[in-house]
Image (spheres, grey):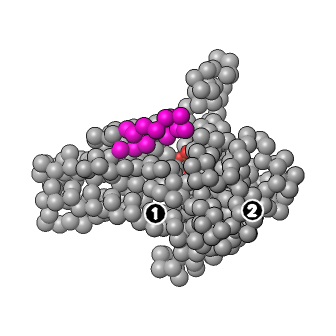
Amino acid sequence: MEAIRIVDKKLLLLDQRLLPGQVNFVECGDWQAVANAILEMVVRGAPAIGAAAAYGMAIAATGLQQQELSLFYAGLTNAAEGLQATRPTAVNLAWAVQRMLNVARAQTGATAAAIADILWAEANIIAKEDIVVNKKIGAFGASLIPQQARILTHCNAGALATVGYGTALGVIRSAVAQGKQVSVIADETRPYLQGARLTAWEMVQENIPVTVIADNMAGFLMKQGKVDLVIVGADRIVANGDVANKIGTYALAVLAKAHQIPFYVAAPYSTFDFTKSNGDQIPIEERCETELTYFAGTQIAPTGACCYNPAFDVTPAALISAIITEFGVIEQPTTQKLAAFFTEANHD
Ligand code: MRU
């Protein structure tokens, strides 16, 4: 279940648009192909697009390695801008690209070819770190899961959305590994169906019981007492603890509050953006109308109807029971708590 595969310095991305029907990898020969794969959702999920973009930077560097240094750096900066412009909400993308640029710029005295090698090594480190971090999130998160739990999740924050293991689904994997009896309720997640197609696929492969529901059913299940907790991933968490995640997350958090059900967010430090004080400042990606007006290739809304297709929404911190990170759990997040937590974790 790898979203990202490297074979002989070749980047292969699992085409998530075709899942669960087909398992097919797309090879990206230049950084523009990586940018296009991110834009077109071949690869998706905040940590996965960050890692893919890091490899995009390494590929760009290899393509520029015969150039003199000033042209090499100009080309690399151009690739960074192109990769970063693909999807505006998930901050892991900018985080990974900037990390790669910083490493490149720190190599004073090295040749372009040597810097390209260093960037491949850095992209490999980013990818490996992601799995380590997700396992730590999983371990911290599992302590919040009761011995028996019916867990509702939205979108896909699993192995496919990361380099491996997952954030929200990583917590579920860790709870299962500890012997807890967990079943998953997967919101189908209109319009892109990441829940029905990807989360359900991951769970089925590991024999973790999963029930797919349409997004508008969650409230009824909660009222029936069929949901013990909600856990989701994040695309960006700002200084006050507001969380951008897949459209529909906010509605779930409101429902969870109304039914007194814990609502957890699982995300790595690379998803935090302390340059923004609250969620109103998060750029929200809008995607094309046809994602709504067509279903599986068939037009379902009349030509002439207007459409609005924001891909993410923002859940206010006040609705969040806890944020689970690789450094531990922040309960009922606030600006002060987050600042103190990360200062203590040596990540200020
Ligand atoms: O549009 P997507 O599929 O990239 O959106 C993905 C999500 O919203 C995930 O929940 C989020 O990126 C966290 S993935 C660990």
Q: Is mark 1 within 8 Å of ligand 1?
A: no
Residue at position x 32%, y 51% in the image: 6
Q: Does the stretch in magenta take in 333?
A: no
Left or right, residue 331 beside residue 61: right
Residue bearing the label numbered 1 = 131
Q: Which residues are magenta?
A: 12-26
Q: Position of residue 199 (x, y in %)?
A: 60, 48
Q: Can see residue 318?
A: no
Amino acid type of the residue that numbered disc 2 sits on in the rendered structure: Ala
Q: Is mark 2 within 8 Å of ligand 1?
A: no
What kind of element bears circle 2?
strand
Q: Quadrant of residue 103?
A: bottom left
Residue bearing the label numbered 2 = 149
Looking at the image, residue 175 lies above or below residue 77 = below
Q: Position of residue 252 (x, y in %)?
A: 74, 52
1 vs 2, front mark:
2
